[in-house]
Amino acid sequence: MKSQASTPEAIARAALALESGQLVAFPTETVYGLGADAENPAAVANIYAAKGRPSNHPVIVHVAPGADISYWAKDIPAEAQQLIDAFWPGPLTLILKRADHIPDAVSGGQDTVGIRCPSHPVAQELLRAFKGGKGGVAAPSANKFGHVSPTMAAHVEEEFEQEIQPGGLIASILDGGQSDVGIESTIVDLSRLATHGPVLLRPGHITVAQMAAVLGTTPAAPDAAAPRASGTLDAHYAPHTPVILVEAAELDDTVNRLHAKNKKLALMSYQAHPAIHAEAWRHLPADPAGYAHDLYAGLRELDHADADLILVEALPQDKDWQGVNDRLRRAAFDSRDVLQEMLG
């Protein structure tokens, strides 16, 4: 089963598949999601099975524009409404106290729930068609757990070759083109305002400064007691090829030393390095939004280069780069000793 154009007929069929307990992959402005009826624990369990995802790792519930958030959360603080008014539909997930009737399958057994309203037109059409716009679609990224998130329908097909066969777990893949944002949504915890204030759990396209301008206070860094949230494990978003972050000033020397060890290199950079040779090279835009848009597609491309490792030029540490720096840090987490091992 290949992905299909997101015609009204295809979207209607996908909505019916969700209502019958099946899984549907669909585009959002951040990345492609693998969706199930958020109120059907068996369907949500199939997401975890398809992805190989730990059952205590929560997913995000996607809702249609204008949805009644009080159906999903037992308390909607003023801060939540302020952020909704400013950034929804868009790449911002709110963590709120879960309403008692919402299954804990979507929250990894916690008493909170993550909710967002995506801005992608196909996602919105699907959410409006699903249960007449009154349902919620639980949807983590449509990839195997811990791997690079998909930003195109072809990426989903690549990830789930077995699951999209006839009789597999995934009923359909809606093609909505390449995701505009390219990295997952910003996640902010509003479930403990009285004791902790707003807390940033995962950076993304919506920045801390933007939220602070709306809230009048800057979201704090995560603390040990913060709710678990999607995509916040130390190792995540990783290709199969080891990823190594290297400062720009050290790239030339690092490449030369690795070539001396007969290593094949793939390189991702945002600056020109004319003296460097690599077997594969992906040059990304030198602005945070453009870099984020191309990041995952670039990592997937370099992962197919048959290289021994992917060298990534370290990015600026400005707050505007926080989201992509977060993703690269997690992608490289399990590879942090590989470079020294290769160099002996």
Image (spheres, rainbow, N blue to C red):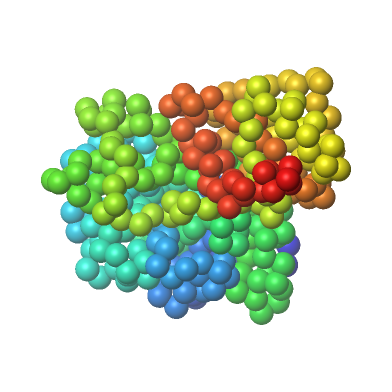
Residue at the (48%, 51%) spot, across then down: 234
Give the side of residue 124 with respect to residue 32, left or right.
left
Q: Nearer the viewer, residue 234 or 303?
A: 234
Counting the numbered discs, the total is 0
Residue at the (26%, 54%) spot, across then down: 225
Q: Nearer the viewer, residue 58 or 98?
A: 58
- Can residue 232 be seen here? The reply is yes
The quadrant holding residue 314 is top right
Residue 83 placement (x, y as % from top left): 29, 37
Against 314, is 189 above or below? below
- Can residue 125 be seen here? The reply is no
Image quarter of the C terminus: top right
Give the side of residue 236 with respect to residue 104, left or right.
right
Give the residue furthest to the front. 344
Q: Nearer the viewer, residue 131 or 236?
A: 236
Against 14, is 249 above or below? above
Image quarter of the N terminus: bottom right
Q: Nearer the viewer, residue 183 or 18?
A: 183
Against 89, is 52 above or below? below
Residue 343 placement (x, y as % from top left): 74, 42
Residue at the (35%, 31%) spot, across then down: 208
Against 344, is 321 above or below? above
Residue 171 placement (x, y as % from top left): 61, 70
Residue at the (37%, 66%) spot, across then down: 108
